[in-house]
C-alpha cells in the first residue's frame, strides 16, 4: 500500500494519476465489449466463412453490433434498477 | 490497513468508487453475454419487444438463481472457516 501513501504527490499529480486509472479502465471495458461483440456477431452472421466478408455478412454484423449495444444498455438499466430496489427493501 | 496514516483519503475514496463501478461493469458484460445467448434471434433493425422482455427477465432470474444457489449452498454445506468446504 506504499503507492497510496501519497504525501509526496502534488494535487496535479494526483489528478493525473486518477485520469490515467480511469483511462485504463475505459480501455479494458472497450476491449471486453469488442471481444464479446466479435464472438457473438461472428456466430450470428457468418455461418459458412467464404473467401471474403460479403455484403450481407457485413450488414448483418453492423446490425448485430447495434443490437448488442442495445442489449448491453438494457441489461445495465435492468440490473441497476434491481440493485436500487433491493437497497430500498433493506 | 486500519492504520490509515499516510494513505491519501481522496485516492482511497477514488479507488473504492472505481472498483465498485468496475464490479458492476464486469457483471453487465457477463449478463449481456448470457442473456444474449438465451434471448437473441436474428439481429433486426431494432430490439423487438419480446426480446426486450426476455432480456429483462433473464437478468432478474439470473440474480434470483444466484441468490438461491448462495443460500442453498450455505445451508447444505458444513462451513467452517478453519477447514476447506465439505459437501454432504
Image (cartoon, coloured by chain):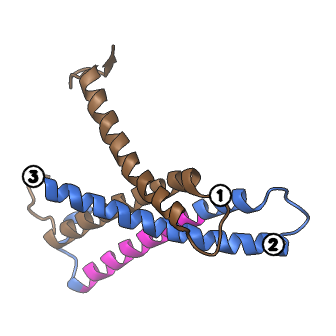
Chain colours: A blue, B brown
Look at the image and tell me whether residue A2 can be seen: no
Region rendered in magenta:
A12-34
The alpha-carbon separation of the residues under discs 2 and 1 comes to: 18 Å
- Is residue A90 shown above or below A5? above
Give the residue displayed 26% in from the left and 78% down from the top: A14
Q: Residue placed at 21% from the left, 55% from the top?
A: A86
Mark 2 or 1, closer to the camera = 2
Front residue of A17 and B41: B41
- Quadrant housing residue A39: bottom right
Q: Is residue A31 magenta?
A: yes
Of the image marks 2 and 1, the number of the one nearer the N terminus: 1
Q: Which of the image's four quarters has the C terminus of chain B? A: top left
**Residue A42 is at least partly visible in this image:** yes
- Look at the numbered disc 2 and give the secondary structure of its residue: helix
Residue at the spot of label 2 = A56
Secondary structure of the magenta portion, mostly?
helix
Read off the chain for label 1.
Answer: A
For residue B72, side relative to residue B53 (left or right): left
- The image quadrant of residue A82 is bottom left
Q: For numbered disc 3, what is the local secondary structure?
A: loop
Q: Which residue is mark 3?
A: B2
Residue A81 quadrant: bottom left
How far from the left and from the top, in percent, is residue B63?
35, 47
Q: Position of residue B23 (x, y in %)?
A: 34, 58
Mark 1, Cα crowd under 10 Å, few <14 / some 14-19 / many 20+, is few
The answer as to whether the residues below labels 2 and 1 share one chain is yes
Dot 1 corresponds to which residue?
Answer: A39
The CA distance from mark 1 to mark 3 is 44 Å
Hey, which residue is sitting farthest bottom in the picture?
Answer: A12
Q: Which mark is nearer the camera, 2 or 3?
A: 2
> In screen coordinates, is A66 left or right of B16?
right
Amino acid at each position: 500500500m506504499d503507492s497510496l501513501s501519497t504525501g509526496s504527490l502534488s494535487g496535479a499529480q494526483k489528478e493525473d494519476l486518477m485520469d490515467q486509472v480511469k483511462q485504463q479502465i475505459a480501455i479494458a471495458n472497450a476491449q471486453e465489449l469488442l471481444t464479446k461483440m466479435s464472438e457473438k456477431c461472428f456466430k450470428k452472421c457468418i455461418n459458412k466463412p467464404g473467401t471474403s466478408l460479403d455484403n450481407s455478412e457485413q450488414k448483418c454484423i453492423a446490425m448485430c453490433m447495434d443490437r448488442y449495444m442495445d442489449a448491453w444498455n438494457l441489461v445495465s438499466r435492468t440490473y441497476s434498477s434491481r440493485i436500487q430496489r433491493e437497497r430500498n427493501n433493506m | 490497513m486500519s492504520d490509515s496514516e499516510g494513505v491519501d483519503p481522496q485516492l482511497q475514496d477514488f479507488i473504492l468508487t472505481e472498483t465498485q463501478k468496475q464490479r458492476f461493469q464486469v457483471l453487465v458484460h457477463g449478463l449481456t453475454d448470457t442473456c444474449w445467448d438465451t434471448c437473441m434471434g436474428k439481429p433486426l433493425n431494432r430490439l423487438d419487444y419480446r426480446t426486450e422482455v426476455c432480456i429483462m427477465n433473464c437478468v432478474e432470474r439470473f440474480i434470483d438463481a444466484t441468490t438461491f444457489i448462495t443460500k442453498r449452498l450455505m445451508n447444505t454445506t458444513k462451513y467452517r472457516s478453519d477447514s476447506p468446504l465439505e459437501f454432504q
